[in-house]
Amino acid sequence: MTHACKVAEFFDGTGGPRTLIQLDNVWVSLGGKTVLEDITLNLQEKRFVGVIGPNGAGKTTLLRLILGILKPERGGVCVMGMSPTELKHELHHIGYVPQNVLFDPLFPVTVFDVVMMGRICCIGPLRFARKKDKEAVHESIEIVGLQGLEKRLIGELSGGQQKRAFLARALCRETHILLLDEPTSGLDVPVQNQFMELLTRLKEELGLSVIFVSHDVNVLARYADEVICINRTMQMQGKPEEVLGSDRLKDVYRCEFDFLVGAGGDD
Amino acid sequence: MLAYGFGQRALVGGLLIAATCSVLSFFIIVRRLAFAGMGISHAAFGGVGIGIALGLNPIATAAVFCVGVAGGIGWFSRKGRLHEDAVIGILFSASMALGVVLIAAAHAYNQDLLSYLFGSILAMNWMDVVILAVLTALGLAFLIFFFKDLLFFSFDEETAKASGVPVRFVYYGLLITMALIIVVSIKLVGIILVSALIVIPGATGLQVFSNYRGVLVVSTVAGLASIVIGLYLSFQFDVASGAMIVLILFAFFLLAVTLSPRRSYMQKLLKPASSPSREED
C-alpha cells in the first residue's frame, strides 16, 4: 500500500490542531511472528497519550515504529507528516526514554556526558560540542532538576535521578515528541508521582506531545489526556475514563482493575 | 638502543601501535569485547596458516582472515541465535585448528612460527613500519571521528539507534578496527599476548579515573610508557621484547589497582592504626 505523508502541511499548516502520528492498517512482524496487526491510529499533537496493553501486546514495538527503528511490513506510517525514510533526517524532533537502560554502573560517563548524547543529532563535525550544545545540556539538566549533579557518574545516581537524566537527554534536542517506555517502572510511588508531574509540566511549558507506555492504570488515569489500548491489534482509543473503565480492558488483561479516575489530578 | 636501526623501528612501530590500542582498549573494556579481542587474535593463527600454506604474506592473509572472523562474530551475534561469547568460542578454536592443520600440512613448524606466536618487533623493517603507520592511522581516525557515536552506542544502544547513530556501522567498524590493529600488533607481541595490548591499558585507566577523559589519558600514558620501558628493559637484559612490554603493562595495572583513589586498599593501608575506641566495645 502506498501512503503519502504531507510534511509541508504539518510544518506550514494554519495553526489548528495537527495530526502528529498517523498509522494506516499497519502490520509489523518480528522473527516471522506478527507483533502488530492492522493498526490504524491518529494522534493529535500536544496531547499526553498513554499506551496500555498486556505484556507482549506490541507497545514497545509501536514506539519503535514511530521512531523509525522498525519498518512496517504493510501499511503506512506518518510522523509529523513524514514517512519513516524522511524521518531519519529529522530525528532531532523526537526524544526517547527507553524502558530500562542496562548499563554498567561503573561506565565512565557523567550526567553531563549522558545528556550531551542527546545532542548527537545536532552537533557538528567530529561531534565536538559547541557553546550552544553545552548551554542546551545545562538547560535540560536544569529543567529536570538535576543541577549540581552534572559531574556525578550516572551510575551513582538513584533510579529516579537516572530517569530524570535520561529525560534530560531526550529533551536536549529540538524535541516535539517525547516517547517514553514505562518511565515509572522500578520507581517508588512518590518518585513516580514526581516524575509524572514533571512530565505534565514539561508538556505544558514546552508544548510537547507526550506518548508513554505504562502498565499503571492509576498513572494513566491521572495524567493522560487520551489512552490507547493495544493487544497486537488496536483495542480501544479514547479518554482515560472511557478506556480504563471499559469491560473490554478487563477482557484484554483477563483481570479486574481498581483505579481512581482523576484522583489527585488537581493537586 | 636508538643507535641501531632496528631499535628505532621497534620504538616507532611500538608507539604507533600503543597509541591506537590505548583508545581502542577503552571501548573494548566498556563494550565488554575483551573475549572478542582474544578470539580474533587467536583466530589470526588460522590466517597465518593460510598464508604459509599458500606461500603468501602471512600477516596479509591474517589481516583478511581476522576481518572475516570479526565480521562473522558481529553477524552471528546480531543475526543468529547464539550469544557473542559462544560465537567467539567456536570461531576462535576452529581458526586455531585450521592454522595447526595448514602449518602441519606445509611442514612449516619452524622458528618463524614462533615470531608470529610471541612477536618479533626487533625484526621489523621500515616497510613494516610504513604499513603499520597507515593501518594505525586509519584505525585511530575511525575511533576519533566516531568517538561520540561509539560512546553512545556502548552506553545505550537502543537510544543511540533511535537518535540516528549508525549503530550497525559503528559496531562492525569497531570489530574490523580491532581485527586490523590486532594483526599489526602481532609483530610487536605475537598472537598469544596481543590481547594484553587491547585490554590492559583501558582497564588500567578505569582503575584510576571514573570519567572517560581521564580513563583515556591514563590508558594512553600506560600504553606508550610500557613500549618505551619494555623495549629498553628487553634490550638491556636481552629478553623477549613483547613479553617484557606486556609485563610492564601488567605492572602498571597492578599499580593502578593498588594506588587508585577509587579503591580503598591504599587508604586502609595508610590509615594510622586507631586506638581502641568505645565503638569496639
Image (cartoon, coloured by chain):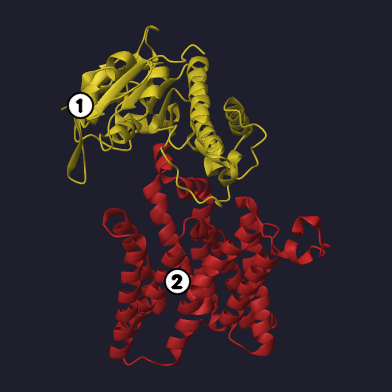
Quarter of the image for the C terminus of chain B: give it.
bottom right
Closer to the camera in the image, B250 or A266:
A266
Q: What residue appears at the point 35 percent right and 76 percent down from the top-left corner?
A: B47
Q: Which residue is mark 2?
A: B183
Closer to the camera in the image, B267 or B147:
B267
Chain letter for red, please.
Answer: B
Query: x and y percent of residue A140 in the render?
Result: 57, 28
Residue type, label 2: Val
Q: Is residue A35 left or right of residue A20?
A: left
Q: Chain of mark 2?
A: B
Query: x and y percent of residue A172 in the render?
Result: 53, 30
Secondary element at image label 2: helix
Q: Which residue is mark 1?
A: A251
Q: Residue furthest left?
A: A1
Circles 1 and 2: CB atoms closer than 8 Å: no
Query: x and y percent of residue B21 in the render?
Result: 54, 64
Quarter of the image for the N terminus of chain B: give it.
bottom right
Vertical relation: B235 (above or below) A232: below
Q: Drawn colour of chain A? A: yellow
